Amino acid sequence: MNVALLGFGTVGYGVYEILRKTPDIKVSYVLDLKKHDDIEAISVTDIDPILNDKSVDTVIELIGGLQPAKKFVTAALEAGKNVVTANKFLICESFTELSKKAKEKNVYLRYTAAVGGGIPWLINLSRLSRLSPPDKISGIFNGTTNYILDSMESEKAEFDVALKAAQDLGFAEADPSADIDGLDTLRKIVISANIAFGGVFDSNDTDLFGIRRIKKADIEAAESLGLVCRLLGTAEKTESGASIFVEPAFLDKNSPFAAVKKNFNRISISTPLDENLGFYGAGAGRYPTAFTVVNDCLDIKSGSLEAYSSSFEEKCVDNSKISHKYYVRCPIADAWLSSVTEKSVGEGVITKEIPVSEMHKNAKRLLNESDELFFAEIKVGV
């Protein structure tokens, strides 16, 4: 197997190190913004030599982001080359287009590392879905945010301090927006829903709220209730499609999610045959992702795996039928919030049960008046 590696950052270098020691796989090219004279592979800054080299059968995309990653991956598939990627943004936004292109060209498109880091999650989800399609998926999909929340809980760290520590350890990027705003989690839960529920969901139709605005007061409020805070992505099957949303959650300390520490992930899946199955593993860092990328290459080499999903039916997202109680901290007086409030806790309030879509709609409205808003669903006994 001859591969070309696109991107030579944290994960890319980890993949290169592992592949150098992997029998029967040769890294022929490394594409990066700058030339690398200290590697055995041919260093290039343009993809054309890779596309024109018929001996290269597999392209590994680790650039990240939507462009130029999409352009390069599309060109590689068009050239009849297998593609392995860890790019959840790319797969979430272009799931149908890239999957159909791979099928048309009779090549593999593997993206196990895009969701769940080193678990690996998507392979297990795909296999389970063939036998017993899931009813619900819920979990901690982002190791960076979990590290931050765990540090705020266990070390009483301020948000900024915990974020800086995550960056210093390589868990968070210099621009951590995708992590702390929940976008990374959203992309992963949408990809998971596509596979689990046999269709394609538009991420723009989902509801999203991250942890950018969390304060120590919110952690203390959770503790006063005997709860801990985690960022969860949830997808639940409905008659018309699915309910899909990302939001912080206050969880019972006995919850399996509450026990997840540092940069680890845990994903739970409910099926008609098994009430609840849990998957646990590292969710951030160089080697958990790199090992999964290399395993995708080995799977392609063996020719043993089919596509994760072959259904491209567009399905709708509806979050109006799922209701929770919420913790809400809002520094301004608001008639709607007053109308749904049950009691006060710390600097915030606890609401009665309200639909997920209603909470998110009003949160967007309130954020136009105050950037200090924070909320979390309350999941006792989960």
Image (cartoon, rainbow, N blue to C red):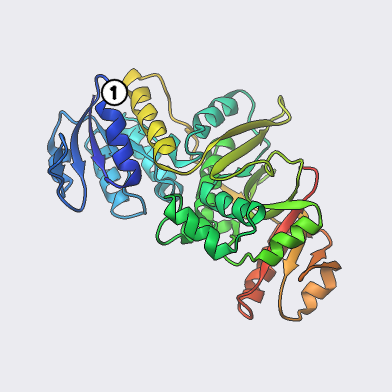
Residue 156, image x, y percentages: 65, 58
Q: Which residue appears at 61% of the width and 23% of the height?
A: 131
Residue 15 in the figure: left or right of residue 194 = left
Say above or below: 6 vs 40: below
Give the residue type that dot 1 points to. Answer: Thr
Label count reads: 1
Residue 314 in view in this figure: no
Residue that mark 1 sits on: 22
Residue 152 in the figure: left or right of residue 356 = left
Say above or below: 23 vs 256: above
Secondary structure type for disc 1 = loop
Q: Which residue appears at 46% of the width and 59% of the height?
A: 176
Say above or below: 1 vs 270: above
Q: Which residue appears at 41% of the width and 56% of the height?
A: 173
Say above or below: 61 vs 161: above
**Quarter of the figure that contains the N terminus:** top left
Residue 31 in view in this figure: yes
Given residues 123 and 315, the one toward you in this image is: 123
Given residues 63 and 36, the one toward you in this image is: 36
The quadrant in which residue 368 appears is: bottom right
Dot 1: few (<14), some (14–19), or many (≥20) neighbours within 10 Å?
Answer: few
The quadrant in which residue 337 appears is: bottom right
Residue 34 in the figure: left or right of residue 193 = left
Residue 177, image x, y percentages: 47, 61
Q: Which residue appears at 53% of the width and 62% of the height?
A: 161
**Quarter of the figure that contains the C terminus:** top right
Given residues 166 and 97, the one toward you in this image is: 166
Residue that protrudes farthest toward the front in the picture: 155
Residue 164, image x, y percentages: 48, 60
Residue 59, image x, y percentages: 26, 36
Given residues 229 and 2, the one toward you in this image is: 229
